[in-house]
Amino acid sequence: MNTKKKNAAPTMKDVALEAGVALGTVSKVINGLPVGASYRLRVEEAIQKLDYHVNSYAQGLKSNKTYTVALLIPNTYNPFFARLVYEINIALLKRKYRMLLCTTDFDSKLEQDYITIAKQNKVDGIIGLTYNPNLQVDESISFVSIDRPMGLHIPCVASDNFAGGQMAVEKLADLGCKNVAFLRVGSALDSEPNKRKAGFENGCLARGLSYEEKIITDGQPISEFEAFFQSHIANGKLEFDGLFCVTDFLAHEVIKMLKNLGLTVPSDVQVIGFDGVRAFGTGDYFCSTIVQPVADIAEMCVSLLLSETMQTKPPLICLPVSYAYGGTTKDSEAFAKFAKKGEAL
Amino acid sequence: MNTKKKNAAPTMKDVALEAGVALGTVSKVINGLPVGASYRLRVEEAIQKLDYHVNSYAQGLKSNKTYTVALLIPNTYNPFFARLVYEINIALLKRKYRMLLCTTDFDSKLEQDYITIAKQNKVDGIIGLTYNPNLQVDESISFVSIDRPMGLHIPCVASDNFAGGQMAVEKLADLGCKNVAFLRVGSALDSEPNKRKAGFENGCLARGLSYEEKIITDGQPISEFEAFFQSHIANGKLEFDGLFCVTDFLAHEVIKMLKNLGLTVPSDVQVIGFDGVRAFGTGDYFCSTIVQPVADIAEMCVSLLLSETMQTKPPLICLPVSYAYGGTTKDSEAFAKFAKKGEAL
């Protein structure tokens, strides 16, 4: 009579017994190490017969590796975050790693809690796009940050936001703009995307454009921009012929406002956003835009996080952005096709 | 001299020793069971001093519970999937569960592989929105399916797609339509969303509308719909005054086509989609739409999956949908406001 507890999962020992081989042979087969073909066959048959499954949990305890990475991100419904989650998952999958998804809703406490939870789950590393300026990450855990510099011991991966800001305004200049404005909503938090403003200013200086900036913080109503436009309309004409908005979302909102004010995009004023977000994730760009290289950001984060040989990890990595036409600028069709070749999102 | 291996993580035993209490007392504090206040304080101080962290891995091995749920979903960049991932994560977080995110890219083999991986990781259950008609899910694992019926032992959670299809066409009838069409792209796979068509037909019969249907499969070019419209234009006028599209994405594409054909939405033809997708996840609806109750679907999936007392799980649960105005129908502003109250996404 079989005294084995009913339903108890079979172990490697059971497989060895069933196959009539040594435990080490089973281990070799499971870990893909070379063994004689007949041994391999016997082990594989025993695995199938017993319905044996590798216990990643027990493996994790032994090897001190779980092949799991936690991703901290505010949410997945913002299309930029949604695409980032997807690309990071692809980059992990390629390396046979799994993702523990932690959506934080911009909650500082939750961000900190998730780091504790991730450590308790013995993840091999954490990738974080966080908003807690005081986030505590001890050096015992491998961490890569997206967009937020968090100190020299934590690599930060971002788009080249400065170059993107400059690219946007130089594109506006190429398309005939003389008097432009930069619009931004955002926290005062030190972050790489803040460099879009500096890039914009640099581009204006380089091309001799006159410019204004209207910056509101997260709490302020977006209608502040409408008041800003109204104060810059004379005889039904907007003073600006080009606008650079800090995100595609803001550009989308601003275009609605302009329409309400009786202005037409792009004939009255050209608009460029930032991110490269597409309707339904794969369709049209919402506006002409600076495209973030999301797949490259994801690949770089995962590659850095899991690198065991790199003793000195680079503190800041900026990846190249590209311009894409999305109907809110005066690019010709032919030009649009050319520009779209560089699209990454 | 301290002979403890450098960097070895402190254990519960170390905490007990430091606090000068029994191991059982430490366990009670960690698991939130009642102990005397002074004992609790001593244990908490020892935990802080030693920087002790619960080893969820070891806990999982002992308790046979990992407080982890795997989610199988094609991707996160489709906005409906993106919102679903977010809401399921919220529902898990409320119960202190974590999500292992498995994006499958509609790949049947990957879907099956992820079930093996999830089992190896000893997840407490799997929620799946899958496309593999032959997906093998043995009864040893708790599984809840979204949108796909997978047999009586696996609960399936979906929107009430039949009611949604009927609601869409009844709304078109209320708004004056007499001659409508149903447009669909989709696989032949048996799935709950397929009932949108039956609901549409039922609504047409109930309201005495004449109707046509144009259904193409996943591989066919979407331009088939343009040809369909062209064959139904007489003297520059489309025969249909109302269209029900199986998704918001299709509605969005169809509206572009109609524009190319010189037709105006909603004055020439009204369009209703399905899903309730918003631009940028939180902004405008792309079109007038039947809104899926994504938060309710998420909550129901998690609740069913983790229910330990429910011996007989319901095989199919259909959750109520609602209509939302999104600019592509002739609802008055006042009506739109009224209708929007029911919005869920």
Image: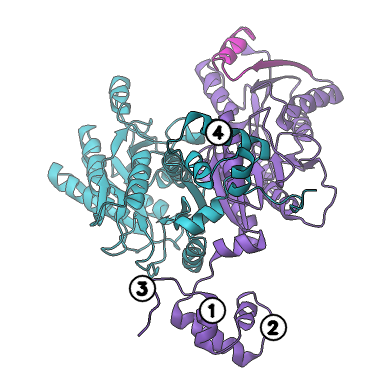
Chain colours: A cyan, B purple
Q: Residue under label 4, please give it.
A: B110
- From mark 1 to mark 4, how far is it between C-alphas? 42 Å
C-alpha span from label 1 to label 2: 19 Å
**Spatial distance from mark 1 to mark 3, Cα to Cα?**
17 Å
Amino acid of disc 4: Leu
In reply to whether residue B229 is colored magenta, the answer given is yes
Residue A114 x, y percent position in the rendering = 50, 63
Which residue in the protein does label 3 denote? B6
Query: A237 or A318: which is nearer to us?
Result: A318
**In magenta stretch: residue A143:** no
SS for dot 1:
helix
Disc with the residue nearer the chain's start (3 vs 4):
3
Question: Could you tell me the amino acid type at mark 3?
Answer: Lys
- Looking at the picture, how far across and down is residue B60, in whole percent? 61, 61
Tell me which chain the residue with mark 2 is part of: B
Read off the magenta span.
B210-233
- CB atoms of marks 1 and 4 within 8 Å: no
Comes first in the chain, label 4 or label 2: 2
Separation of marks 3 and 4 at Cα, in angstroms: 41 Å
Q: Which residue is mark 2?
A: B34
- Amino acid at pointer 1: Lys
